[in-house]
Amino acid sequence: MASGARLINPIAVSTLIAGEELAAHRVVIWHATEAKTVSYPAGAADLQIAGVTMAAADSGACVDVCRLGDCLLTVNGTTDIAAGDLIEIEGTDGMGVKRATTDGTTYRELIGKANEAGTEDGHEISVFVSMAAWGWTS
């Protein structure tokens, strides 16, 4: 677990259907053909972000997804994350990662902003999740 205060305050949560077995605190995307169904991203540039799972779920089960607000996200901390860093999709495992570039370009795969630091792979950190983050730039 990352150091610092734990800020967990989801504002909007949707109960959806897991399109595959899902771990807790991972980014999920909308399923291409199944309504109200979510699965892991197909890659780092996946644009159909639904939010972050709040608990693990078996395939076909209901899963609560944080759509807006402060929630926990498992991150790849191989690149140190500091509070305030923009967080984007790492890849197909649903983990978040510090935004790779700072050239001022808008990245649609942004998830939100880190509320605390994460310096190790697999850390769960507090992140402010916002689908409005898709328009954030630095």
Image (cartoon, rainbow, N blue to C red):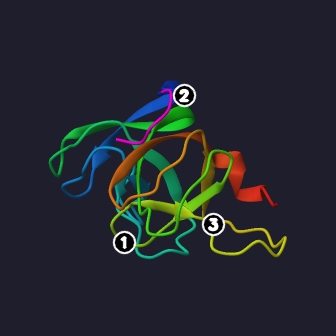
Left-right relation of 16 to 138: left
Q: Amino acid at mark 1?
A: Thr
**Is residue 64 rendered to the left or right of residue 117?**
left
Name the foreground residue: 78 vs 89: 78
| Amino acid at the residue labelled 2 | Ala
What's the amino acid at mark 3? Arg
Q: Main secondary structure of the magenta part?
A: loop
Does 30 lie within the magenta span? no
Marks 3 and 1 sit apart, C-alpha to C-alpha, by 16 Å
Q: How many marks?
A: 3
How crowded pointer 2 is (Cα within 10 Å; few <14, some 14-19, many 20+) is rated as some
Residue 88 in percent (x, y) is at 57, 62
Report helix, strand or loop for mark 1: loop
In the rendered structure, find residue 84 and report the number of the disc placed on it: none
Q: Work out how far the residue at label 1 is from the one at label 2, CA to CA, in angstroms.
A: 24 Å
One can see residue 36 in this view: no
What residue would you read off at disc 2? 12
| Residue at the farthest left position | 58
Residue for badge 3 = 99
Give the SS element for disc 2. strand
Residue in view at x 27 percent, y 37 percent:
55
Who comes first in sequence, dot 1 or dot 2?
2
Extent of the magenta region: 1-5
Residues packed near mark 1 inside 10 Å, few (<14), some (14 to 19) or many (20 plus): some
Disc on the earlier residue, 2 or 3: 2
Q: Quadrant of the N terminus?
A: top left
| Picture quadrant of residue 138 | bottom right
Q: Badge 3: few (under 14), some or many (20 or more) residues near its Cα, within 10 Å?
A: many
Between circles 1 and 2, the one closer to the viewer is 1
**Residue that carries the numbered disc 1 in the rendered image:** 92
**Mark nearer the N terminus (3 vs 1):** 1
